[in-house]
Image: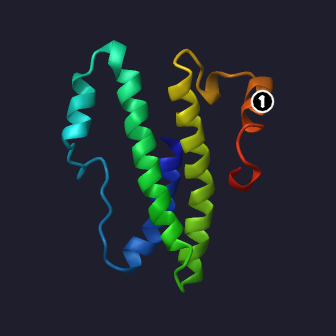
Amino acid sequence: MDAAILAYTDMKPFADARNVKLADSTTFVPDKSISSLTKAGSSTFDKKYLSMSIEGHNRAIALLEKGTFFGDTAIVSFAARQLKVFRRNLEEAKYLSKSPNSKMATERSAKEVEELEDTIPKQIR
């Protein structure tokens, strides 16, 4: 969630300069996938959530990759910064989806985090 807040904060100046209103907690309208997640039982919630997270991160990464080819250096810089974060979070979601009993990074010891980071390709750290 912190990554989404940072992305929103970084994106706000671009949106304001172009008179684009970004969605926030007061304008967000849940879609069918959010509705299905809220109805999921405890046995399927994690699996559904991680699946949605992986799909959403893949879509965001595809958009950010396009942003790295813009002529505007500020947008290229924003996209490059956010790509690192979204790729790292995607790898975390993939790891968690393959290891249902695994712990989130915030619940791991420093040694466990280092071991996980060793599995992430260096270009996306």
Spot occupied by residue 65 in the image (x, y as percentages of width and height):
53, 66
Residue 5 against residue 116 in the figure, above or below = below
Relative height, residue 125 to residue 37 (above, below): below
Amino acid on which disc 1 is placed: Glu
User: In the rendered view, does 53 fall on the left or right side of 112?
Assistant: left
Return the x and y of residue 99 as percentages of the image width and height: 56, 21
Q: Residue at x 29, y 67 (%)?
A: 21
On screen, residue 34 above or below 42: below
Q: Total label count?
A: 1
Q: Nearer the viewer, residue 12 or 114?
A: 114
Identify the residue at horizontal 58%, vertical 31% (top origin): 95
Q: Is residue 54 above or below residue 66?
A: above
Q: Position of residue 38 (x, y in %)?
A: 25, 27
Q: Quick check: 53 left or right of 81?
A: left
Q: Is residue 51 left or right of residue 96?
A: left
Other-residue count near label 1 (Cα within 10 Å), few / some / many at <14 / 14–19 / ≥20? few
Q: Quadrant of residue 111?
A: top right
Examine the image and state in which quarter residue 120 appears.
top right
Residue at the location (43% across, 66% down)?
Answer: 12
**Residue most toward the front?**
98
Residue 114 quadrant: top right
Q: Which residue is mark 1?
A: 115
Colour option used = rainbow
Please give the name of the residue rendered at 19% of the width and 40% of the height, measured from the top-left corner: 32
In the image, residue 55 lies at what x, y percent?
Answer: 40, 45
Secondary structure under tag 1 reads helix
